[in-house]
Image: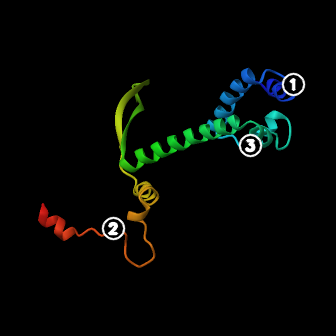
Amino acid sequence: MSKAQIVKWRDSGLSRAVSLEKMVNLFEEYGGQGMTTREIDRMMGGKQVAVRVMARFPELRAAYHRGIDGRTVDAEAALLQRATGFTKKSIKTSTRTYNGKTETYESEEDVFYPPDVAAIKLLLTNREKTRYNNDGDGKPAVVINFTEADKAL
């Protein structure tokens, strides 16, 4: 939907049911793209237009926030992947010159990215606050006795 269509929807008496359905999809897409209300305002041609439209039509506000929530889920999934480690395929290109001839080779290899300690800490302290946060009493939240663990093995 173009800017002209948005302005037409905003200013004219188009059928609310049909147009609102299109706008709901559009606002969900805007939230998913990470657009701010100011950026939406610029597209709609005014100041505070997005806020007023979302206040008038709660369906649009809900759609916008659904789009934002989808991005949050994607970010959490990427953080979890980084915290647990992952393997990714990579294409390595090498060039060799022999007797004046240049040859290029491509090889596919699996690259392992080990778990990231900072990502682990971030996940645990935010997801399991009561278990993994230091509450200021000078003791860590989780105490692991390694000598007892060694005996158990």
Q: Quadrant of the N terminus?
A: top right
Residue at 42%, 78% in the rendered image: 137
Label 1 Cα neighbours within 10 Å, binned few <14 / some 14-19 / many ≥20: few
Q: Earlier in the sequence, mark 2 or mark 1?
A: 1
In the depicted structure, whether residue 111 falls above or below residue 124: above
Which of the 4 quarters of the picture holds residue 109? top left
Task: Kindly state the secondary structure of the residue where label 1 is placed.
Answer: loop
Q: Earlier in the sequence, mark 3 or mark 2?
A: 3
Q: Give the amino acid at mark 1.
A: Ser
Between residue 126 and residue 99, name the one nearer to us.
126
Label 3 Cα neighbours within 10 Å, binned few <14 / some 14-19 / many ≥20: some
Q: Position of residue 47 (x, y in %)?
A: 85, 43
Which of the 4 quarters of the picture holds residue 153? bottom left
| Disc number lying in front (2 or 1) | 1
Q: Marks 1 and 3, how far apart in space?
A: 22 Å
Q: Which residue is mark 2?
A: 142
Q: Position of residue 50 (x, y in %)?
A: 77, 39
Q: Position of residue 15 (x, y in %)?
A: 79, 21
Q: Give the amino acid at mark 3.
A: Thr
Q: Marks 2 and 1, how far apart in space?
A: 61 Å
Label 2 Cα neighbours within 10 Å, binned few <14 / some 14-19 / many ≥20: few
Q: Which residue is mark 1?
A: 12
Q: Earlier in the sequence, mark 1 or mark 3?
A: 1
